[in-house]
Image (spheres, rainbow, N blue to C red):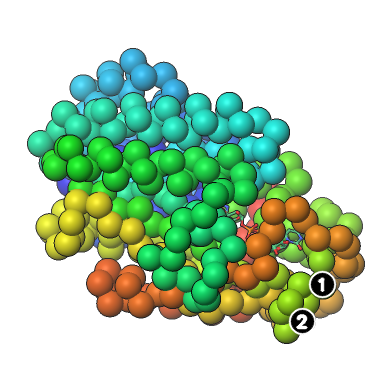
Amino acid sequence: MKILVTGGLGFIGSHTVVELQNKGFEVIVIDNLSNSSLDVLDGITAITGEKPLFQKLDLREKNNVSAFFKEHPDIAGVIHFAASKAVGESVEKPLLYYENNISTLVYLLKELATKENAPFIFSSSCTVYGQADKLPITEDAPVKKAESPYGNTKQIGEEIIQDTCKVHQNIKAISLRYFNPIGAHESANIGELPIGVPQNLVPFITQTGVGIREQLSVFGDDYPTEDGTCIRDYIHVVDLAKAHVVALERLIDNKNKSNYEVFNVGTGTGSSVLEVINSFEKVAGKPLNYKIVNRRPGDVIAAYADTAKANDELGWKAKSSLDEAMDSAWKWEQKVREK
Ligand code: WQD
């Protein structure tokens, strides 16, 4: 069975390609290489022994999208990662984000609408909840006005899919709302490759650990939390990748309860920034150089998932601890720097 993975050379995409191949799926990857590199294909192949089909393609070019689907009528499902995902950049370049994250989704769905049967997995984010009123966050928590164009594209994306599925019953879709993906495959052949200065906490920590960055700035320790720093749900990227395969199989096996479903994908455990730093110091066996600075605008105080729906209905549960995820991130960082 051939599965299309858009953005399949990215951080979460590449780990999902590995898990799809591990489950016997044939994978074709499209990626415009704007935030990834062809080396990732070699990393995937080194792990599974099977090189995925690959086509460089920019989903903003709708004629090329149509041509691709005509060339591959046997695509049995789609997992859609391809999108821009930097919160800060989205504030400065909203039109780039609306074009790259929304127009591309519409072109993709127009192709799926012509297929007899189209299982579709959408990469969404806990960002849609903003600062939830209740913790842990359940799937029926209200979606709040996004704090950034990036977050808005995830909210709009979910609405576009929901409206489409109402009309095109042949499309069966699941939105997976990720919490904070971290870590790398245990082989350290693939992992997170932030371009430029990392925006996210864990890659900044590991780059500080190897000496690429001088010092980590902790954005505020005056929040109403136990140690004053923000709380997030850090999930191992391999656990997250496996959730995509389980969700796709749910649709292929017609186990879905409606043709549009939403699941939170997290560990269900919240960790503060200082706890993440402590985890690094434990696995690396050395102190991390950091300082407390002012808060970062737009940060929510705390966000962690209620995972009951994913555990009970999807039959999926995250397995790795924060330390195991951090250990894999640290191993990956050291290996990348050896090259
Ligand atoms: C986590 C915590 C920061 C960097 C974002 C997106 C989300 C998803 C993951 C795409 C916060 C603190 C961070 C640093 C710090 N992206 N921090 N110093 O903001 O929860 O989520 O990335 O899907 O959609 O919103 O993740 O890693 O940026 O921050 O103190 O140098 O670490 O303040 O409390 P975030 P993050």
Residue drawn at 32 percent across, 72 percent down: 309
Residue 62 position (above or below residue 49): above
Residue 263 position (above or below residue 101): below
Q: Position of 276 compared to 153: left or right? A: right
Quadrant for ligand 1? bottom right
**Nearest to the observer: residue 20 or residue 176:** 176
- Disc 1 packing (10 Å; few <14; some 14–19; many ≥20): some
Residue drawn at 89 percent across, 57 percent down: 214
- How far across and down, in percent of the image, does residue 3 sit? 26, 44
* Residue that badge 1 annotates: 221
* Residue that badge 2 annotates: 227
**Nearest to the observer: residue 329 or residue 315:** 315
- Visible residue check, residue 191: no
Where residue 283 sits, quadrant-wise, is bottom right
Secondary structure at badge 1 equals loop
- Disc 2 packing (10 Å; few <14; some 14–19; many ≥20): some
